[in-house]
Image: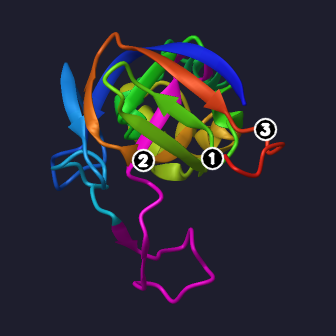
Amino acid sequence: MKKAQATIQALLIADLPETFVTRRIPETVFEFGGIRGDRHFGITSKADTRQPMYPRGTEILNRRQITVVSEEELEQIAKELEVETVLPEWLGANLLVKGYPELTKLTQGSRILFPSGTGLICMGENMPCIFPGEEIQKHYEGHEKLAARFVKAGYKRRGIVCAVERPGIVHEKDEVQILINDFSNPMQ
């Protein structure tokens, strides 16, 4: 398994029922199920359009407990959209990392390990949708069609979704170790 390092730039929570937009917090506890109080908290969730193999509303494993984005990929999205910045809050992210510029390419089964021993397991790419684009549009009224343009700009840059593999406390500015699943060892 290959290894890399990154630094946590922000921890965020979506704890307002009317929006997916997150707010920054200095530390939190990752539990089995994610961050208690976050809109995506839970060991299970209901199937939606992202899981067309199941009838809508079927209880399934929650693969989207924690959403992770990279500062470098957000900069690429902003550049393509021709805006100053794209904040992780606008994408509903729970974790912003710096130092691993191709986060979205992280393979399923890869891990993010924190100094406390807390661990996340990558469940796959977070596919871009129009809702974050609509949020970005609110902050750049002079730019046209950002909602639709975000889907293309965010493709392969939107970050990853993770499940909590080992609960524990995490802090802003934690140095994390990324264990990259290269699929060569079936015991990972």
10 Å neighbourhood of mark 1: few (<14), some, or many (≥20)?
Answer: some
- Amino acid at circle 3: Asp
C-alpha span from label 2 to label 3: 19 Å
Going 37% across and 40% down the picture, which residue do you hit? 92
Locate residue 14, reporting x and y percent.
Answer: 24, 43
- Amino acid at circle 2: Glu
Q: Nearer the viewer, residue 126 or 80?
A: 126
Q: Is residue 66 magenta?
A: yes
Eyeballing the image, is 154 above or below 187? above
Q: Which numbered dot is residue 165?
A: 2
In this view, the residue farthest toward the bottom is 55
Where is mark 1, residue-wise?
Answer: 109
Going 66% across and 46% down the picture, which residue do you hit? 188
Where is mark 3, residue-wise?
Answer: 182
Eyeballing the image, is 188 above or below 61? above
Q: What kind of element bears circle 2?
A: strand
Eyeballing the image, is 28 above or below 46? above
Going 29% across and 61% down the picture, which residue do you hit? 42
Mark with earlier residue (2, 1) = 1
Q: Which residues are magenta?
A: 44-73
